[in-house]
Amino acid sequence: MKHIGTLIIGAGQAGLAMSRCLSDRGIRHVILERGKVANSWSHERWDSLRLLTPNWQSRLPGFAYDGPDPDGFMSMPEVVRYLETYAEASKAPVEEHTKVRAVSPSGSGYLVETDRGTWRCETLILATGACNIASVPALSGDISKEIDQITSLAYRNPGQLADGGVLVVGASATGVQLAAEIRAAGHDVILSTGEHIRMPRHYRGRDIQWWMEAGGIHATPIDEVDDVNRARSVPSLQLIGSHDRQFCDLASLSDAGVEIVGRLGGVRDGMALFSGALANHCALSDLKMNRLLDALDLWAEDNAVPNIGAIERFASTPVPSPSRLMMPLSDGRIKTILWATGFRPDYSWLNLPVFDRKGALMHDRGIVAPGLYILGLPFMRRRNSALIDGVGHDAATLADHILIQRGRSAA
């Protein structure tokens, strides 16, 4: 058995940021990684995906993008290289190809069993991410075996898909991007749409992420949110990592030939049943977008922000009238259903009483239990907690907490 005071599980951006913050405070530690650094970015993203944040916003503790295209958007191979370079620059103590099998309590610390031996530690940090398992609704079991089903975690490119129509379920950032790509590849595409948030790529001459950062939206602390659980489950903005298009929204998809329908509510006797609330969801999405733009305009006026364009407003999302409420899945039109219905973390190896009655891991701003921490989840401490540019703030705060706790233990 190996012993280390502090152990990190996961060598993505969260684990590497945590490692750098611990090293800066003189705290010895080891990172366990099931594959190589940035494993999820290498193996669990589709081929054409780019970050939704511009390159200048790729900042981690002690490290930042310094390439020739600060306003561009990293491809997945570029993200992997960025994180590998960060790990090397930080001299991160990563034990690669080490899969954690179980974590259990051990005295005042934790026992971590891996496929390469067992570790014991006093402090354990979970940095395995929030997107380990695709969330697929139970109704998927009611779909004929003749129709292929694939999740966004397994999807790589349109070449994987059978010839014929594709039903994409989910209209957040992932769903709209994949619907656009698959339609451009020549497939007949239907997009099933529930709650979503429309957003322009750029506004008044600046990238929307510039506005979100400069206006303090990204830095919103969890203390200022009325409903924490709701804030943590808000859909990702309908954006694409490119300046070529102002919108990747339902209107642009409809113009490209994608049929927009309501939320998939069930499958009965081979018939897909869609909600009739499409118009309401679109109206609410437009309302949320305009509320944010109003807030940004007010901030710009209050702070006399220079060198920005005139106030913009955008046409409401067009809604088909009437929208389709049902569609046969047995007539051969739909050959594939792609589930873009979100993700959830995988803690099946965590044998600790730290889950609520619904199976969700409980934590208070990343503090789970004495000596146990979590990092990299949505809105953990601030709105941008899950972004590359936001995880460093949370990592520094938790590292300070660990340092204080170590001092108390020593005393």
Image: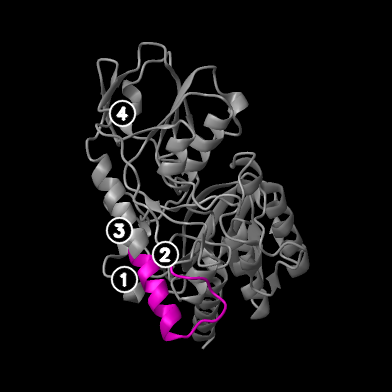
Q: How far apart are labels 1 and 2 at the CA level? A: 10 Å
Q: Please rate how many residues cluster around mark 3, counting C-alpha atoms within 10 Å: few if below 14, some from 14 to 19, many from 20.
A: some
Q: Earlier in the sequence, mark 1 or mark 4?
A: 4
Q: Is residue 14 left or right of residue 96?
A: left
Asked whether the residues under the numbered discs 1 and 4 touch, taking CB atoms below 8 Å apart as contact, a structural biologist would say no
296 part of magenta stretch = yes
Mark in the foreground, 3 or 2: 3
| Residue receiving disc 2 | 379
Q: What residue type is labelled 4?
A: Leu
| Residue receiving disc 4 | 139
Q: In this view, does 156 lie above or below 251?
A: above
x, y percentage for residue 380?
43, 66
Q: Is mark 3 on a helix, strand or loop?
A: helix
| Residue receiving disc 3 | 287
Q: Which amino acid does label 3 sit on?
A: Leu
Q: How far apart are labels 4 and 3 at the CA level? A: 30 Å
Mark in the foreground, 4 or 3: 3
Q: In this view, does 351 lie to the left or right of 54?
A: left
**Nearer the observer, 156 or 134:** 156
**Nearer the observer, 336 or 256:** 256
Which residue occupies the extreme front position in the image?
A: 310
Q: Which amino acid does label 1 sit on?
A: Val
Q: Residue at x 34, y 76 (%)?
A: 223
| Residue receiving disc 1 | 225
